[in-house]
Image: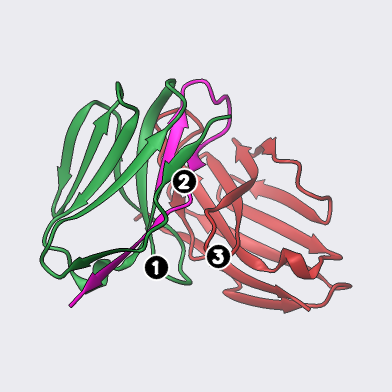
């Protein structure tokens, strides 16, 4: 079962709201990722967790705050977002961070900031 | 700068033809190569990966890797309208540290019935 789930599927939020995106996988993967994807662009890496520790933060603004409560769950907390943050937010997981890993993506959360 | 280049397309092929998608990469230290398919509004789906020079076949898909020339390609035989999507090439370098994958911008494939 190569399934990564994400909730919610769609989210509309105002610039003063606080919301969270959730991601879950039950494949025993130890690396999890957040990506942001704008229309007609490739996914852009935001954060990587390896063994529940933040491994990579690609200079993402602090209005995005990741959290990895356990090996199966990954959250992205959102606060004071800007309209340009509207995008498809993708979660992915892989067995590990080693060079042979292949990533499996969740269905994404379509975020609109008004 | 580690780069992965793809022709953005659209690449239009008739139904039943072979679609050939190409990807070049600049980092000679690259070790693992992946093809993702992404339908409009959906998330990327891993369809092939290849690590060694040569061909790797899976059903109607064949991935080809030539490390000397630094290119990787994806062939889709007997193309179907349902294959119409954007195909993303992704590369992982031995020297990329913790950076998992570098994505190309994708090639949009249109299979005409």
For the C terminus of chain A, which image quadrant?
A: bottom right
Q: Position of residue B49 (x, y in %)?
A: 30, 40
In the rendered image of this protein, does residue B46 appear above or below residue B102? below
Q: Position of residue A81 (x, y in %)?
A: 82, 65
Task: Tell me which corner region of the image, top left, top right, bottom left or bottom right, holds residue B23.
Answer: top left
Chain in green in the render: B
Looking at the image, which is closer to me, A75 or B16?
B16
Q: Residue at x 52, y 39 (%)?
A: A30
Categorize mark 3 by other alpha carbons within 10 Å: few (<14), some (14-19), many (20+): many
Classify mark 3: helix, strand or loop: strand
Q: CA distance from mark 1 to mark 2?
A: 16 Å
Q: Is residue B3 left or right of residue B68?
A: right
**Which x, y percent locates residue A84?**
75, 66
State which region is magenta: B89-113
Q: How is the image coloured?
A: by chain
Instruction: Give chain A's shade.
Output: red
Looking at the rendered structure, whether the residues under marks 1 and 3 are on a common chain is answered as no
User: Which numbered marker is on residue B104?
Assistant: 2
**Neighbour tally class for label 1: few under 14, some 14-19, many 20 plus, Cα within 10 Å:** some
Q: Secondary structure at mark 2?
A: loop
Residue under circle 3? A6
Q: Which residue is under mark 1?
A: B39
């Amino acid at each position: 079962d190569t399934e990564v789930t994400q909730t919610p599927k769609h989210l509309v939020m105002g610039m003063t709201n606080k919301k969270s995106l959730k991601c879950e996988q039950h494949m025993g993967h130890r690396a999890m990722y957040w990506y942001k994807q704008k229309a007609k662009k490739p996914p852009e890496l935001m954060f990587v967790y390896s063994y529940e520790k933040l491994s990579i933060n690609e200079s993402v603004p602090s209005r995005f705050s990741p959290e990895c409560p356990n090996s199966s769950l990954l959250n992205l907390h959102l606060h004071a977002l800007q309209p340009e943050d509207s995008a498809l937010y993708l979660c992915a997981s892989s067995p590990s961070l080693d060079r042979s890993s292949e990533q499996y993506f969740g269905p994404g959360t379509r975020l609109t900031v008004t | 700068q580690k780069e992965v280049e793809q022709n953005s397309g659209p690449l239009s092929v008739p139904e039943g033809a072979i679609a050939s998608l190409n990807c070049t990469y600049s980092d000679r230290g690259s070790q693992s190569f992946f093809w993702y398919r992404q339908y409009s509004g959906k998330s990327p789906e891993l369809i092939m990966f290849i690590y060694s020079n040569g061909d790797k076949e899976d059903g109607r898909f064949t991935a080809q890797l030539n490390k000397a020339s630094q290119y990787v390609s994806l062939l889709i035989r007997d193309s179907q309208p349902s294959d119409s999507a954007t195909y993303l090439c992704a590369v992982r370098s031995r020297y990329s540290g913790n950076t998992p994958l570098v994505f190309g911008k994708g090639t949009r494939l249109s299979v005409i019935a």
